[in-house]
Amino acid sequence: MTGPFRPTVAEVDLEAIRHNVRALKPDGVELMAVVKADGYGHGAVPVARAALQAGATWLGVALVEEGLALRDSGVDAPVLVLSEFPPGSEKDALEAGLTPSLYTERGLAALAGAAGRDVGVHVKVDTGMHRVGLWPPEEALAFADRVVDAGLRLEGLWTHFARSDEDAAVTTGQLERFLTVADALGRAGHRPRYRHAANSAATIRLPAAHLDLVRVGIALYGLGAAPGLAEEAGLRPALSWRSEVSMARRLPAGESVSYGHRYRLERDAWVATVPVGYADGYSRRLSGRAEVLLGGRRRPVAGTVTMDQILVDCGDDRVEEGQEVVLIGRQGEEEIRADDLAAWSGTIPYEIVTGIGGRVPREHRG
Ligand SMILES: Cc1ncc(COP(=O)(O)O)c(C=O)c1O
């Protein structure tokens, strides 16, 4: 195939990724770049490479398939799969050198059967998130014995925070419970090389949680898990989402635009058509709420977001086909952030960037 022909692109600044790794990595602590969901929509392989160049030593993925794709692209850094390997995937995952998370008897048995050589595992304990992990966390004591008896190596012990972006007391409580288990394991002779707990918010706000390694996702991309966090840590957003005006015309007052005619022009106005829609991840919930940047100014999205196109009310300002439109990013003095789209559509920036569709080409620079 040739192309892409469409003018709608997500541009990813890899220098921003490197800057963010350097800004986030605590001294003497390793950093895992969490590149699941195609690097939070930024492109897992280029992001992984940039993060490793800047000092990350681990990569984190949600799926075995995501780990295999990194290996197929020649990425050979340690990769932790953040949930247990699904049944049947163990052989492929181990052959590719992916590191397993472990927290069930079934997972342990499957791995013990498949592991032919020295395999380091990261046992996950549930300290309150109640998604996956050994519960209660004290179960890890007997489990660690069984891991070793099965011929596996206990390389890591880890947990995940439920509210590190909003509640320091709950997070500290989870951390204390985790450390109590880690200490008990140590007394029983299990001293994993890595104890890890911190996601982005805890990496920025709770140094006590840094331990041996931090697992950084959203902040790697320059976005905040909570309002103000990205700015607090001096992060740079890596992704900008741009398009161009595909059609422009002046419509008379009283005309209504897009499906349902939900937006009526109160006066004559220039209206621009932009080729991006909800099939690209520009949510229909942004209808009548979002703004874009066009001609250096913020402009309202007029009416309903359609599958492939939106309309933009430019008022008296003449617009022309081919003019740049910014959905996320800077234009002139103005900036629209993924956080803005999240607020307008009632979600979090994570969902905005991971939701940018596969048919939007990613362009990497830097
Ligand atoms: C287990 C685990 N660790 C770390 C992260 C990274 O979290 P964040 O993107 O908030 O840094 C995630 C992401 O959801 C995760 O599931």
Image (cartoon, rainbow, N blue to C red):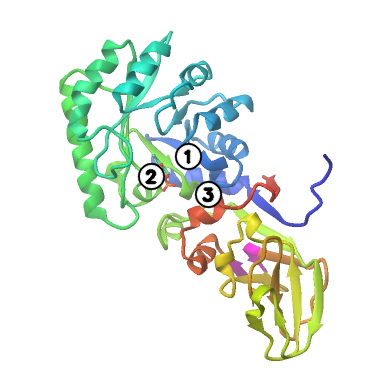
Look at the numbered discs 2 and 1 and tell me whether their residues touch, using CB distance below 8 Å. Answer: yes
Q: If the image is split into quadrants, where does the C terminus sit?
A: top right
Residue 344: give x, y in percent of width and height.
51, 69
Identify the residue shown where x is 31% and y is 58%.
166
Q: Which mark is residue 57?
A: none
Q: Which residue is mark 1?
A: 34
Look at the numbered disc 2 and say if its residue's Cβ is closer than 8 Å to ligand 1: yes
**347 falls in the magenta region:** no
Look at the numbered disc 1 and say if its residue's Cβ is closer than 8 Å to ligand 1: yes
Whether residue 342 appears in this view of the structure is yes
The residue nearer to you, when weighing 81 against 323, is 81
Q: Secondary structure at mark 3?
A: helix
Q: Which mark is residue 221?
A: 3
**Amino acid under label 1?**
Val
Identify the residue shown where x is 61% and y is 56%.
281
Q: Which residue is mark 2?
A: 199
In this rendering, the answer to whether 238 lies above or below 242 is above
Label 2 CA crowd tier, 10 Å (few <14, some 14–19, many 20+): many
In this rendering, the answer to whether 200 lies above or below 62 is below
Q: Which residues are magenta?
A: 327-336
Residue 356: give x, y in percent of width and height.
61, 52
Report the side of 134 relative to 334 (left or right).
left
Residue 81: give x, y in percent of width and height.
44, 30
The residue nearer to you, when weighing 351 against 218, is 351
Residue 255: give x, y in percent of width and height.
73, 86
Q: Quadrant of residue 44?
A: top right
The residue nearer to you, when weighing 115 against 164, is 115
Distance CA(mark 3)–CA(mark 1): 10 Å
Report the side of 200 relative to 309 (left or right).
left
**Amino acid under label 3?**
Tyr
